[in-house]
Image (tube, helix red, strand yellow):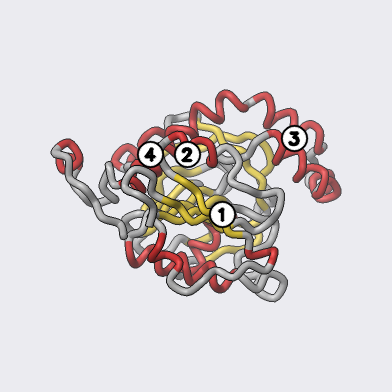
Amino acid sequence: MGTPDRPRVLVVQHEADTGPGSFGPWLRAAGVDLEVHHPYLGAVLPEGVLDDVDGLLVLGGAMGPEDDERCPWLPATRSLLVQAVRRALPTFGICLGAELLVVACGGEVRRGVAGPELGVLGIDPLPAAAEDLVGESLRPGSRVVQWHWEEMSRLPEDSTLLATGSGYPHQVFRVGAAAWGVQGHPEVTVAIAQAWAREEAPLLVAAGRWPEDLVAEVAANQPTLAATWRPVAEAFAGVVRGTRPAAGVPRADVAGGAHVDHS
């Protein structure tokens, strides 16, 4: 575990150019340290790794959530997510990470029937978001970088949908008490977008998006994106620190100084 003042979040990164991005400095500034694992380089997540951390962050990637033959660490990652949900360990999944959370907990992910979502697009928070400790800062007209070909077609049981979108309905959600997923990429920096645009240029053009235009769109919206998603990262850090309870614990307990032990 981290120290009482600096809890630790285990980060599972699936690709070299898909790191924590903006979420790294936002979480660190909010009092949380990151321990980044790189299983695509052959690093093995040790048994019992969740016993030594205070939260879990699973990042995005170009692979599918069940692309186990090409990415042999994915079954272990899904197992981690199941354990985290059972423990109510604060967990956050971004794009592929959210898809892995859905599959691990019994939901379904498929190739998006409406095609890829690409660009800085709006999402619509639902009434449940106002009562959610991580989703409460989302406002009508919130925007997020979308860069995905899959869709989460069915959420797991014990899920709460927090925000939807015009293209695909399952944009932000919570599974159980303390596991959140986002279909989009709230962590994306301009540098990350540039790397993806270089690597996926043929796919982007085939989908009707010029890579340089997509990067410019991400760059132009950086202030708006930060204003939307930094509060979400800070709220998640608050749950990790135990200064806020997980879902289902009365807010009055927070005001009274109750501590939630997520170990």
Q: Quadrant of the C terminus?
A: bottom left
Q: Are marks 2 and 3 in contact (CB under 8 Å)?
A: no
**Tag 3: residue type?**
Leu
User: Mark 4 or mark 3: which comes first in sequence?
Assistant: 3
Mark 2, residue position = 28
| Marks 4 & 2, CB-CB < 8 Å contact | no
User: Which callout, 3 or 1, points to the residue nearer the camera?
Assistant: 1
Q: Give the distance between the C-alpha atoms of the residues marked 1 and 4, in whole angstroms.
A: 20 Å
In the image, residue 212 lies at what x, y percent?
81, 33
Query: Which is nearer the N-term, disc 4 or disc 2?
Result: 2
Above or below residue 167? Residue 53 is below
Q: Gap in Å between the C-alphas at discs 2 and 1? A: 13 Å
What crowding class fits label 1: few (fewer than 14 Cα within 10 Å), some (14-19), or many (20 or more)? some
Q: In the visual, does 96 lie left or right of 41? A: left
Q: Amino acid at mark 1?
A: Val
User: Disc 1 or 4, which lies upstream in sequence?
Assistant: 1
Name the element at disc 4. Answer: helix
- The foreground one among 120 and 76 is 76
Of residue 100 and residue 28, the one placed in the foreground of this image is: 28
Residue at figure coordinates x 57%, y 37% from the top left: 22
Q: Which mark is residue 36?
A: 1
Residue that numbered label 4 is attached to:
235
Q: Which residue is mark 3?
A: 214
User: Element at badge 2?
Assistant: helix
Quarter of the figure with the N terminus: bottom left
